Image: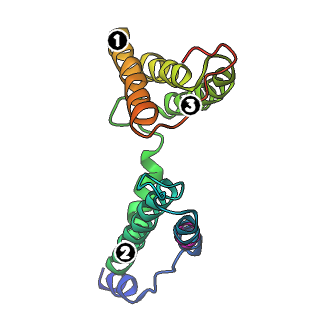
């Protein structure tokens, strides 16, 4: 018994390079977008939101999230718990998640979401962006999340109103109306 404990205590944990490479790539992309977005201008001469503001804010979130992920990974490696947690996560992947879905149901949901995004992009050319996105929200909540139709309807209408108020009225962004020119 004491031999195995001594062997484990003296064993050198091998660092997985793959996850670190991905973390550093995300950090590099975040920093590059952050620097590039400043060149577009964070605000216009009129004091309105400039074209670089959204990419700037997104890159700040990306850089901060990546740094937090790096710190957490370092902490786990130093504690020696990464290998155990990773093995447990792989073993739990085939189990039912906290919503009661199996791996097959989760995979089906991913396919449905990508299909909904593709359909939304195609419908945007016909019926416009706001209506397409509202239908997508309704469909995802009703058919992927399997919530009652009235909750999906409220969410769809709410997303339409939010998009119209924020982008159409407040930010004065010209939104695609599609071939039908509805909204």
Colour scheme shown: rainbow
Give the residue at mark 2.
71
Gap between marks 1 and 3 measured at Cα:
30 Å
Total count of labels:
3
In the depicted structure, whether residue 112 falls above or below residue 55: above
Verify CB contact (< 8 Å) between mark 1 and mark 2: no
Q: Name the N-terminal-most of marks 1 and 3.
A: 1
Q: Name the N-terminal-most of marks 2 and 3.
A: 2
Give the residue at mark 1.
148
At a point 59% along the width and 70% down the height, the residue shown is 25
Give the residue at mark 3.
175
Q: Which quadrant would residue 7 be assigned to in this image?
A: bottom left
The reply to whether residue 146 is visible in this rendering is no
Q: Choose between 72 and 62: the one closer to the eye.
A: 62
In the depicted structure, whether residue 63 falls above or below residue 155: below
Quadrant where the image shows the C terminus: top right
- Left or right: where 30 falls relative to 2: right
On the image, the x and y values in percent for residue 89 come to 42, 53
Where are the magenta residues, as a range? 23-31
Gap between marks 1 and 2 measured at Cα:
41 Å
The reply to whether residue 54 is visible in this rendering is yes
Task: State whether the magenta stretch is mostly helix, strand or loop.
Answer: helix
Gap between marks 2 and 3 measured at Cα:
40 Å
Q: Does the magenta stretch include residue 7?
A: no
């Amino acid at each position: 018994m004491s031999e195995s404990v001594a062997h484990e205590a003296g064993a050198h944990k091998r660092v997985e390079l793959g996850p670190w490479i991905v973390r550093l790539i995300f950090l590099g992309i975040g920093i590059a977008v952050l620097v590039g977005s400043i060149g577009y201008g964070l605000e216009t001469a009129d004091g309105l939101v400039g074209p670089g503001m959204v990419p700037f804010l997104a890159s700040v979130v990306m850089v901060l999230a990546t740094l937090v992920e790096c710190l957490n990974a370092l902490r786990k490696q130093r504690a020696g718990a990464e290998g155990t947690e990773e093995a447990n996560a792989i073993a739990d992947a085939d189990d039912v998640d906290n919503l009661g879905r199996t791996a097959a149901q989760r995979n089906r949901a991913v396919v449905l979401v990508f299909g909904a995004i593709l359909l939304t992009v195609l419908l945007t050319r016909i019926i416009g962006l706001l209506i397409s996105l509202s239908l997508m929200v309704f469909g995802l909540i009703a058919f992927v999340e399997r919530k009652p139709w009235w909750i999906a309807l409220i969410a769809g209408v709410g997303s339409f109103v939010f998009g119209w108020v924020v982008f159409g009225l407040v930010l004065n962004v010209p939104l695609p109306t599609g071939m039908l020119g509805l909204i």
